[in-house]
Image (cartoon, rainbow, N blue to C red):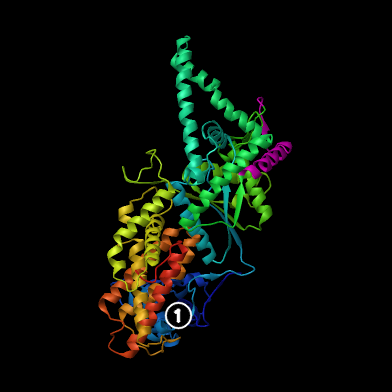
Amino acid sequence: MQSDKRTNEMKIEEQITTAALAAVKELYGADVPTQMIQLQKTKANFEGNLTLVTFPLLKTSRKNPEETAKEIGAYLKDNCNAISDYNVVKGFLNLVIAPAAWIGLLNDIHANEKFGEKQVTADSPLAMVEYSSPNTNKPLHLGHVRNNLLGWSLSKIMEANGYKVVKTNIVNDRGIHICKSMLAWQKWGNGITPEQAGKKGDHLIGDFYVAFDKHYREELATLTAQFQQEGLDEEAAKAKAEQESPLMKEAHDMLVKWEANDPEVRALWKMMNDWVYAGFDETYKALGVGFDKIYYESNTYLEGKKKVEEGLAKGLFIRKEDNSVWADLTNEGLDQKLLLRSDGTSVYMTQDIGTADMRFKDFPIDKMIYVVGNEQNYHFQVLSILLDRLGFKWGKGLVHFSYGMVELPNGKMKSREGTVVDADDLVASMIQNARTLSEDKVNKLEDITEEEKNNIARIVGMGALKYFILKVDARKNMLFNPEESIDFNGNTGPFIQYTYARIRSILRKANAQGINIPATVEANAPLNEKEIALIQKMNDFGAAVAQAGVDYSPSGIANYCYELTKEFNQFYHDYSILNADTEDEKTTRLVLAQNVAKVIKNGMELLGIEVPERM
């Protein structure tokens, strides 16, 4: 169903595994399952490249670890072309890979533009990844940035693991919070448009949401004081003020009209939402993310109500005396969960049931992944149970990709309200910081244009932002430090980008000198230990991609890219490429460099990060 893009040459690990199985059969007369052949990287202080763990084979060999390892080692040296030598340490069989096998692996990597990634075919399973999920009453903020970057990266990682992927978004475009912005614009907006205000539509609507809250608080303060003068204590006066607030009543009346399809209210709602969507599109474009299918809560909430009512009719749910509908989850060790309020209106759970049902009707989904913060862990635990109870066979298989909060150091980059950092402000600040910090490097480039300077600043700034966020285990809360992220040394996006650009510069110089990089490296080409380490590290990319797919972990890819970059820089510190001692060494090192750049680019692409050709 899923297949690796590769040449016909069998990978080194596969050759050794096949030969080791044959060794056990030949030496001990037994067929053992493949998983009993356990290979791992040889520890740095021992001679060898791969280590075969013999302990799972001792029952079969009926010999001690030392003898078993020596016998299998001797067989492999004689019968497996990939092995040139071996040594045994406390029952661990350390295998030295033959230089020709490393060259074969390098040629395998060299021949495959997407080495380590799986092809998507017509028969590939389909994964849907939901992320972003904004409200249409305010702009995207720092929390959305982490969500969007994780969602996009996870989608790319699933594709690299052989899944067809549908990237989806559920837009929370209805409800009382939307009506608050609409009412505020009606009352105090004087018909202003984003163009007239000179700002993005999502920011303009966010201003009116803030305006509603400001007027509402003022109204509550006035009413509370009035009711206290009439003899109520402070708590009772506050409660009565909230109950009798004319402003909140107007917002609720507008929501009722919206649900009744009032033409005037619906027209206002559509106009203001369109402004917000235009603003969101700009932010998404700046972040380098997008979607294949967008769902709107205004289209899904009725579907959810229908499903709940069907469940009620089947006795799956209960209706209480106040007419509200609940799911009793006490048998699952949980509590009761509200599905419909007493007035018949839906809650988030109802809407999610409706959205899930629509999605699985629209697409043949094999895996549904929700990228949502960890404060919703319980919500998705319940959603999975409810969908299963409603008879959806895919209900139990839902994946909640839960992530932690992201914060900024105190006092840095606060928005005008002093509480939330807008995504647009953060992006603009990162690009400006990148422009300032990379100016010296960029100005040294020949024939550099303003357009290219701007593009490099954008690539470096966004690379710094994305890498700093994605290198952290998504499950953890994190502190995003803008200054630390734009550092050309250490575990940062710009460090990796700069290394990539340096390699591309070397390759351009080679081309200018008329050096052609061959399609394959000769089997007897010279290799030193640092070069072998680079080949081995590149070969690890496939395992990193596979593990990131199992763990839903962009951080695994980020840290792999950093390790490969470090490995190359250590090699380049010790060995010249263009001034190598021999032409054969030069050719091999150019092939190595070209493929390190390729793997870095492909790895960073899985994170949604661009790499510049020069910087």
Q: Is residue 121 above or below residue 177?
A: below
Horizontal and vertical percent position of residue 42: 35, 72
- The residue sitting at 42% across, 61% down in the picture is 556
Disc 1 residue type?
Answer: His
Horizontal and vertical percent position of residue 130: 55, 52
Determine the residue located farthest toward the right in the rendered image. 313
Taking the magenta stretch, the answer to whether it contains residue 315 is yes
Q: In which quarter of the image is the N terminus?
A: bottom right
Q: Is residue 515 above or below residue 301?
A: below
Dominant secondary-structure state across the stretch colored magenta = helix
Q: What range of the chain is rendered magenta?
A: 297-322
Identify the residue under disc 1: 110
- The residue sitting at 36% across, 84% down in the picture is 512
Helix, strand or loop for disc 1: helix
- The residue sitting at 30% across, 76% down in the picture is 571
Q: In this view, does 271 lie to the left or right of 571?
A: right
Taking the magenta stretch, the answer to whether it contains residue 265 is no
Please tell me how many numbered marks the rendered image carries: 1
Say whether residue 169 is visible: yes
Q: In which quarter of the image is the C terminus?
A: bottom left
Determine the residue located farthest toward the top in the rendered image. 231
Q: Quadrant of residue 520?
A: bottom left
Say whether residue 386 is visible: no
| Label 1 CA crowd tier, 10 Å (few <14, some 14–19, many 20+) | many
Q: Which of 37 and 299 is in front in this view?
A: 299
Q: Which of 98 and 129 is in front in this view?
A: 129
Horizontal and vertical percent position of residue 548: 47, 61
- The residue sitting at 48% across, 16% down in the picture is 237
Q: Is residue 585 above or below residue 268?
A: below
Horizontal and vertical percent position of residue 104: 44, 84
Q: In which quarter of the image is residue 68?
A: bottom left
